[in-house]
Image (spheres, grey):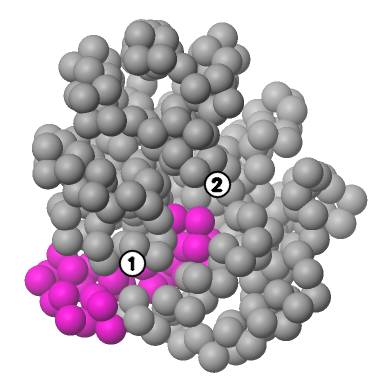
Amino acid sequence: MFTGVYTALATPFTAGGKTDFQALETLIEKQIASGIDGLVLLGTTAEAATMDEAEKDELLCAAVKQIDRRVKIIIGTGTNCTRTMLQNTEAALKHHPDGVLIVTPYYNKPNPSGLIEHFRRAGELGAPIVLYHIPGRTGLKLSADVLRQLLQSVPEIKAVKEADYDMARVTDTAVEFAGPLDYLCGNDDLFPQYLAINSSGIISAAANVLAPAFVKIYKAWQKGETEKAFSIFRKAYPLIKVCYWETNPTCVKYLLSRLGVGGATVRLPLGEISDVHKEKLDAVLKQTDKSLLI
């Protein structure tokens, strides 16, 4: 259901902090032209946590209309409040997405019974769910046993976006679940490793800038051209790494601004990146093969 390259789309803002719909249109068109398989709207990279409900709806109306079913759409609806998550999901379903992305609740650190009930209630709304596991942001790491219980209790979970850096745990869960479950890489810098353990694709923040690179890597791997895939990854890797020098999406949006797609504005509590990092980002961007960039 969810295979290939999905870009976790950034939300361009004007210098005054409003959604820049002209830049959003440009970004969407560049993404689709790069050959991606889908777009994730209102995820972490979109700074959805800083957007009010009216802004979210306005963005979804504009983006969904422009995408026009040319690629799949996943909408982020997760929060650490079950009631709010359900409200977000109901609002998202009005736009008929292919799925919803729901992060394991952060800060609360729910116990297994609460976690299962959280996702079970989301499942009752009927949309395919991509469970987002990112313990570095949420403080909650799912054991293989709890993930197994979740999948047994909530059949609407069709995919997992896995962003754990504990590759021993990732391998354990991939061996058991990748295949019947769409197992999507959530760590751009580990894409080859995830492909090697039967990942069905990637949801990538760096693809805002490097969509052609990720598409080429994925297609080469699918053809069995693993050396070619890694060669492309090696070329893209320096820029992938610098996308995360400061908290995502600060560096991604700066790089987009240097490519002429919107400004670098982010919303508080995220702030402008340091001048030192700007210089380093410029240097790495200049050295990157232009065929790998949007």
Residue 49 position within the rendered picture, expressed as x and y whole percent measured from the top left = 67, 34
Q: Is residue 51 left or right of residue 245?
A: right
Residue 64 position within the rendered picture, expressed as x and y whole percent measured from the top left = 53, 39
Looking at marks 1 and 2 on the same chain, the residue that comes earlier in the sequence is marked by: 2
Query: Closer to the observer: label 1 or label 2?
Result: 1
Q: Is residue 222 left or right of residue 165?
A: left
236 over 100 or under it: above or below: below
Quadrant containing the N terminus in the rendered view: top left
223 over 54 or under it: above or below: below
Q: Does residue 79 appear in the picture of this structure?
A: no
Please provide the residue range marked out in magenta: 204-231
**Which label was assigned to residue 66?**
2
User: Which residue is drawn at the image coordinates 35% and 15% (left, top)?
Assistant: 112
Q: Amino acid at mark 2?
A: Gln
Residue 145 position within the rendered picture, expressed as x and y whole percent measured from the top left = 21, 25
Magenta stretch: dominant secondary structure: helix
Residue 272 magenta-highlighted: no
Q: Amino acid at mark 1?
A: Val
147 over 9 or under it: above or below: above
Q: Secondary structure at mark 1?
A: helix
Q: Does residue 114 appear in the picture of this structure?
A: yes
Q: Residues within 10 Å of mark 1 (few under 14, many from 20)?
A: many
Residue 83 position within the rendered picture, expressed as x and y whole percent measured from the top left = 56, 9
Which residue is nearer to you in this view: 166 or 274? 166
**What is the spatial separation of the Cα atoms under label 1 and label 2, in whole angstroms?**
21 Å
**Which label was assigned to residue 215?**
1
Q: Is residue 247 left or right of residue 123?
A: right
Residue 230 magenta-highlighted: yes
Which residue is nearer to you in this view: 173 or 214? 173
